[in-house]
Structures are given as C-alpha cells and as structure tokens.
Amino acid sequence: MIRVKQILSIIVMMFLSCVTLAAQEPEPPIKQDEPTSEVVISEEMQADSQTDSKTLPDVPTPLVASCGGQDSPGNPYPCGNGGNCTWWAWRQAKNSWGVSLPGWSHAKTWANSARNAGFPISYEPTVNTIGVNTWQATGGIVYGHVGWVEAVSGDMVFVSEMYYGSPGVKNTWRHKSYFDAGYISRKSAPAISWMSPSTPYWSWYTQDIWVYGSGFSAGSVRVEVTFPSGTKTILSGAQVPYSDQYQFRMRILIGSSGWWSIRALNNDGARSNLHYFYVY
C-alpha cells in the first residue's frame, strides 16, 4: 500500500514539472509582414514607357501582306494605319521589276543600301524607279521618304507613295530635287554567256563547272538544272561554293548524256536566261 502511494506521488510531481516548463517556454516572435514583389511604377517611368504614335518601327518585321487596301505578299515592311512609304516602294519594285528587295530599314538609307547591293543610282528620274529623300521628318525624327516614279515631265516627277500613319496611296507631283539621294533603278537581269568546260562528259563523279556572264548574286546565287529527262533540281550552298557578279562555280553530278540546261537564280528573285549544253 505504501509503495502504491509512493508511485502516485512521483507521477503527480512529474506532471506538475511539465506544466511549469510549458508555462515558462517563450512565445514565438510576432511575424512581420514580408515585403511584396509588387513593382511600383512612378509617373515618370510611365511617361518614359509610352511610345510616340508617330515613331516608325525598325525593320525587318513580320511580313505584312496588305496595307491601305493594297496587297503585297512577302513584304518585309510594317504598315502603319494603312500606310508606309517603304512598304509601297517595295511592293512596286516587286510588281514592276519582278524582284524582292532586301529589308533596307528606313527610307533615308535606301540609296546607299541599294548602291551597295549593286543597284544603279541616277540623279535623273525615269519611270519605274524609286526616288529617295534623306531629310524628310516624321514626328520630329528624320526617316527620309521614298516614292515610286510613275511619270516624268521636265524637272517634275509624278510619284505614287504612302505615308506612315496615313491610309492609302497618294499621287503627287514633286520637283526632281526633292529626292536628293537619287533614283534607284532595276539591276540588269543575270545573264549566262558561256561555261567551262563547254561540253562536259558524263561521269559517275561530281564535276566542277565554271559558268561566266554578268549580274549574278555574289556569294548566294543558286542554279536551276534541267536533266535530259526534263527533271529539274536546284543547286545551292556547298553545291555552288563560289559566286561573284561575273562568274560562279557549280559542283554537279552529270550522270547521263544528252541536252542539259542551267539557269542562274539570284537571291532577289531575278532569273537568268537558260543556257543549254550537250553532254557526251
């Protein structure tokens, strides 16, 4: 009986000890509000982030197939509220010359870019050329202007043109001096004159053939080949390892005798004459 009382006494003491320790345990600190990740934009920052509605975007941009009620598949220039002078000039060159001009950025750069790409530049206007102005400003920023020459009368040129932010095509008489950087003309179409060897033999091995002429795309010409059977293929890349304005080298497997033909394809879409040769 005494032993039982001793055990109960020990249990009661242990219980009271645990309660005392729990009461003495400090409370956890009050959690402070953590900083949030919200970014506060000041009025100055908001003002800086706004874009002038008259500012023209740089190019290249996603292809714009229509602008101001006009169609131009593959056109690399933007359309601003139904208009853009570079979009219209690119369209007219494509339709009239049959070539896809590169993306030459803003109008003021077109004359120099065209000259570097081998296009003739003249300060005397002719029909179906592109007039280039380097000082015209839009929204206080100089972008230049380009227009398509539809007619010439003395010192005056009649141009069709667009303006960025103004829908549709406009027709305007201007003095020829307005286009101070001159007038861009179509490049002469590439032409094949002869090749070496002129009459190759058929072989199971790849042959190097040199082709001579004018107006080829330097470093990027392709070659359309027609076999005696009428089947066609396109040589490009490593199959045309060298090209300049006057010549190119093609690596080709000539595996049968008969009449073959080749045609040079420039990177702007211009195509040369067909050159025929007989393979023995």
Image (cartoon, rainbow, N blue to C red):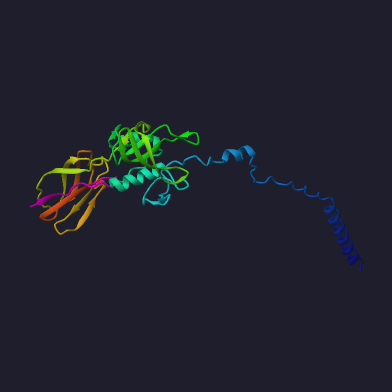
Query: 191 or 71: nearer the eye?
Result: 71
User: Looking at the picture, how far across and down is residue 198, in whole percent?
Assistant: 10, 45
Q: Residue at x 27, y 43 (%)?
A: 220
Whether residue 261 is visible here, answered yes or no, is: yes
Q: Residue furthest left?
A: 280
Query: Horizontally, is 9 left or right of 29 in the view?
Result: right
Query: Horizontally, is 18 left or right of 177 in the view?
Result: right
Query: 60 or 150: nearer the eye?
Result: 150
User: Which image quadrant: the N terminus?
Assistant: bottom right
Q: Residue at x 87, y 63 (%)?
A: 7
Question: How many numbered circles does the render carry?
Answer: 0
Whether residue 100 is visible here, answered yes or no, is: no
Residue 7, magenta (yes or no):
no
Q: Residue at x 49, y 39 (%)?
A: 55
Main secondary-structure element of the magenta-colored stretch: loop
Q: Residue furthest front?
A: 153
User: Looking at the picture, how far across and down is residue 277, in whole percent?
Assistant: 11, 50
Q: Which residues are magenta?
A: 265-280
User: Looking at the picture, how far across and down is residue 90, in whole percent?
Assistant: 35, 44
Note whether 245 is above or below 6 in the view shown.
above
User: Looking at the picture, how far across and down is residue 206, in whole percent?
Assistant: 17, 49
